[in-house]
Amino acid sequence: MAKSDWFVHDRLGMFIHWGIYSLPARHEWIKNREQISDEDYQKYFDHFDPDLYDPSIWAQAARRAGMKYFVVTSKHHDGFCLWDSALTDYKATNTPAKRDLIAPLVQAFRGEGLKAGFYHSVIDWHHPEFPVDGLHPMRENLAFREAAKNRDIRKYAEYLHGQTRELLTRFGKIDVMWFDFSYSQRDWGWSKGKGRDDWQAEKLLAMVRELQPDILVNDRVEIGADFRTPEQYQPVGRVMVDGKPVLWEACQTLNGSWGYHRDNLDWKSSEMLIKMLIDTVSKDGNLLLNVGPNARGEFEPKAIERLNDIGAWMRLHGRSIYGCGPSEFTPPPDCRYTQNGRRLYLHLFDWPFGHVHLPGLAQRVAYAQLLSDASEILMRTIDPSRPAQNTTMGGIGADVLTLDLPVQKPDVTVPVIELFLKD
Ligand code: GLC
C-alpha cells in the first residue's frame, strides 16, 4: 500500500480560507493589494468575532458534498494564526473570538470521516523578521523598507519551523501539509525573492516527515513534492514530470476569491464545478474546492447551494469518481471517461441526438446502464457484412459501439453511463 492510496481514491476535498481578511471581505490578499500597514490592519484583528462559528455545520456540509478530506488555512500570508500558537500573540485567542478555532474544526471534520490537512503560508506580512520584499504590503514605503533592512530571515525561518512543529504535534494525525508559497526566481532589486534556502526547506520537510511519516506534502516549497497543485486551472491531460505521471490536485474557488469576498460575483455554476471534478478525475487528479467563510463564521448561501448540488450529484454518481482514474479509451466529443477496473464511466457533458458513438468499444462491453437509476442502455454495433445497415447508421466504423439514449436528458446535472467491460 502506498501512502497516497487514500488520496488517489478519495479525489475530492474541501479547501477552507478563513482569517481576519474575512472582515474587509475583499480578497485574502487585501493587505498586499491595498498596501495596508499593520496599524491599519489591526481593526480586523480587534473586531474578529465569529459568533456563528460551528465547525460541525461546515463538516456536515463537506461530507454531504462528498468531500473526503479538508485543508484549512492555519495561517495565511497576513500572518494571522487561527490556532493557539505559543510562538505569537497574533492569533485567534487574542481577538474577540477568544479561542482556538482550529482544534474544534479538526475534531468536527474528523467526526464526519474526513482526513485533515493544513495550508500554511511560508510568507508572512506581519512577522518582524520577514523581509520587505516585492509582495510585502509595505514595499513602497521607503522609510519602512529602510527600517526593515536588517531583518533576519533565519529568525523568521525558526518561527516557521516552530509553528509547523506545533501544527504537526498538537492535532493528532495530519494527512496533508499544504505550504504556500516560494518564489526564489523573483528579484526586486532591493530584495531577492524567497526560496527554499530562506525557509530552509530541506530541514523543514525532514521535520514534517519525521513528525508525520504518512503525510502528503504539496509542491510549493519547491522541493520534495508528493503532489502538484495547479491553481484555478484545469490541466490539459495527466500532469507529467520528466515524462512520468505524478499525483496532482487542482485547487479551485467557487467565486473568484479564496477568502470571503462579498462583492465578487464570479460564481462558478454547480454544473461547471461538477464538470471540473469529472474532468480532473479523467486526468488522474484530485479537486480541492474552496470555501471562504465569512467573519461571523458561516458559509454564504451561494456556497452552500453549490455544495448541496455537488452532493446531490455525488450521491448518485460517486461510483464514477471515488477509486476512479483515467481510461485507456478515447471518449467522443464533449464527454469524459473515468475508469475503475472493468467499469468504464462515460460522462456526457452535452446530451447527444439519441445516440452516442464510442470508438474502439464495439466488442468490448458486456452491459451498459445509466448510473443514476441503473436502467439498461441498449447497445448496438454494425455488422460489416450488411452494408445497408451501415448506411442507416450513418457510416459508422465496425469498431464503434453505439448506445441508444432517451431523447430527454435524464434529470441529473451530468448523466453518466456505466459500461461493464468484458474480461
Ligand atoms: C495562492 C495565493 C492564495 C491562495 C492560494 C491557493 O498562491 O497566494 O491567496 O491561498 O494560493 O492555492
Image: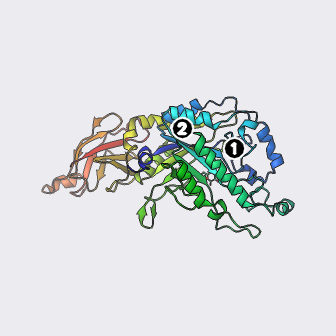
Looking at the rendered image, the disc whose residue lies closer to the viewer, 1 or 2, is: 1
Residue 74 at x, y percent in the picture: 64, 44
407 relative position to 120: left or right: left
The residue singled out by tag 2 in the image is 306
Disc 2 marks a residue whose amino acid type is: Arg
Disc 1 marks a residue whose amino acid type is: Cys
The colour style of the image is rainbow
Give the answer, above or below, for where 260 lies relative to 233: above
260 relative position to 114: left or right: right
- Quadrant position of residue 132: bottom right
Furthest toward the front, the residue is: 210
- In this rendered view, identify the residue nearer to me: 397 or 120: 120
Residue 41 at x, y percent in the picture: 79, 46
The residue singled out by tag 1 in the image is 81
Distance CA(mark 1)–CA(mark 2): 28 Å
Furthest toward the left, the residue is: 385
- In this rendered view, identify the residue nearer to me: 286 or 404: 286
Query: Is residue 254 shown to the viewer in this render?
Result: no
Mark 1 and mark 2 lie on one chain; the one further toward the N terminus is: 1
Badge 1 crowding class, 10 Å Cα cut-off, few under 14, some 14 to 19, many 20 or more, is: many
- In this rendered view, identify the residue nearer to me: 411 or 288: 288
134 relative position to 364: left or right: right
Query: Which residue lies at the image location 64% right of the left edge and 33% below the top edge?
Result: 298
Q: Which mark is residue 234?
A: none
Badge 2 crowding class, 10 Å Cα cut-off, few under 14, some 14 to 19, many 20 or more, is: many
Furthest toward the bottom, the residue is: 189
Give the answer, above or below, for where 165 lies relative to 84: below
Query: Which residue lies at the image location 41% right of the left edge and 48% below the top edge?
Result: 5
Residue 367 at x, y percent in the picture: 23, 42
